[in-house]
Amino acid sequence: MVESRCGILCNQCDYREKVNCEGCVTITKPFWGDACPVKSCCEEKEHKHCGECNDFPCDLLNQFAYDKEQGDDGKRIEQCEKWRTSLVNEIFCESCGMPLDMEEVIGTNKDGSKNQDYCVYCYKDGAFTVDVTMDEMIDISLNHMRELFKDDTSFNEQEALDKMKSFFPKLKRWKA
């Protein structure tokens, strides 16, 4: 799973607990300043992480990776490369957030070709399958999750709802 724009593994970062950092993929502003140039660059280009960029690894990422105080001797670049080439790189439907991890769940364009942005439940034959608002899609997705995880005692409905409310506005279909 992509945890950051620059390749830092948030689940291994000391700041995660020290300052309650949720990671740059979900926050609007880093805890250490007004903006992160790497995060801003990725988001302006609509990349999930630096490894998706044609300029990877760029000078900016190299500066961050090899910074004397906060650098990691290129580990973040290596991680972006793993995400870049990994077959398990999680790609989500840009409408409902469902993982697009199997060929049969990938939506289709009008000409029958695969549409890599949407699942078949949201996008088929070049059109969205349902005309809904983002909040309605969150409700639909939450209902599916309730059914899917009905026997899973670790499933936390409120946590899932909160994640969807922060994640969905970043999806292509719902971006303002």
Image (cartoon, rainbow, N blue to C red):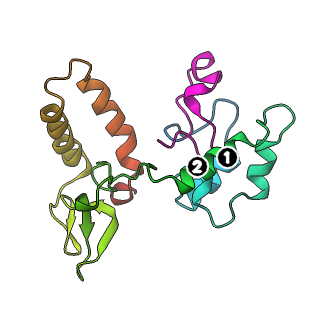
Left-right relation of 8 to 172: right
Residue nearer the viewer, 115 or 131: 115
Residue 103: image x %, image y %? 28, 61
Decide: few, some or many residues near mark 2? Use Cα within 10 Å; few <14, some 14-19, many ≥20: some
The residue that label 1 is drawn on is: 78
The residue that label 2 is drawn on is: 82
Residue nearer the viewer, 99 or 85: 85
Residue 32 position by quadrant = top right
Magenta span of residues: 1-24
- Spot the residue most to the right: 68
Q: Where 147 sits versus 116, above or below?
A: above
Residue 71: image x %, image y %? 78, 36
Residue 36: tell me if it is visible. Answer: no
CA gap between label 1 and label 2 equals 6 Å
Q: Secondary structure at mark 1?
A: helix
Which residue appears at 63% of the width and 26% of the height?
A: 13
Decide: few, some or many residues near mark 1? Use Cα within 10 Å; few <14, some 14-19, many ≥20: some
Which residue appears at 23% of the width and 43% of the height?
A: 138
Residue 158 position by quadrant = top left
